[in-house]
Amino acid sequence: MEHRNSWRRKQEKQSQLWIYLLPVVGTIPALWTLYRRTGNAEQQNTSRLSLVLLLLWLTGYISLFLGAANGSEVLAFRLLYANTILTSGYFVICLGLMFRLRTGKSPYLPLISQVVNKIGRKSK
C-alpha cells in the first residue's frame, strides 16, 4: 500500500511540473508558484525555466513581428518565416522537456537551466 502511495505522489509531482511546461498556458501556474513562494525547489526551478523560455520566445516573436511590419515585402517574408521557426522551436522545446519529465528525468536545458538556477539562488 505504501508503494502505491509513493508512486501516486511521484505522479502528482510529475503532473505539476508537466503543467508548468505547457507552452504559453503553463506560465500562469508557474507565475502563481513563484509569486506565492510555494512548492519545492524543483517546482520553483521548473517555474523559472518556463518563464524564461516564454520571455525569450516573446521577445524574439515581438522583435521579428515588428521588424516584418516595418520592412520591405521580401524582408517581411523572411522575418515572418523566422518567426514561425522560433515559435515552432519554443513549442518543440517545451514538448521535449515534458517528454523528459515523463521518462523520469528532470527538465534541463544546458545553458538556460544554469542561468535559472543562479537566479533561484540569488532570490533566496
Image: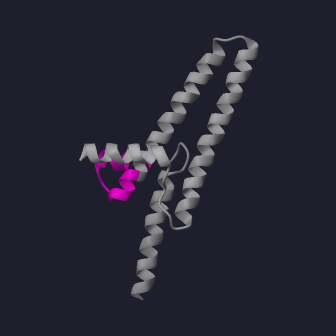
Task: Tell me the residue at 51%/67% (across/down).
Answer: 104
Find the residue positioned furthest to the front: 110
Q: In percent of the image, x 39 and y 86: which residue is there?
A: 2
Would residue 123 be found to the left or right of residue 43 on screen?
left
Magenta: main secondary structure equals helix
Residue at 47% of width from left, 60% of height from top?
106
**Relative to 100, does residue 62 appear above or below in the rendering?**
above
Image coordinates of residue 66 in percent, x first then y, are 59, 18
78 relative position to 63: left or right? right
Provide residue 100's location: percent of width, then percent of height: 55, 60
Instruction: Assess whether residue 38 is covered by the magenta stretch.
Output: yes
Residue that lies at the very extreme toward the right in this rendered image:
74
Is 13 left or right of 66, judged from the image as shown?
Answer: left
Q: In the rendering, at what x and y percent does residue 82 appear?
A: 67, 29
From this viewpoint, which residue is outermost toward the bottom? 1
Question: Residue 86, located in which quarter of the rendered image?
Answer: top right
Whether residue 92 is visible to the viewer of this picture, yes or no, is yes
Would you identify the image quadrant in which residue 75 lies?
top right
Q: Is residue 64 a member of the stretch shown in magenta?
A: no
- The answer to whether 56 is drawn above or below residue 48 in the figure is above
Which residues, given as a range, are shown in magenta?
29-45
- What residue is at 55 percent from the left and 57 percent from the top? 98
Q: Quadrant of the N terminus?
A: bottom left
Give the percent coordinates (x, y) of residue 67: 61, 17
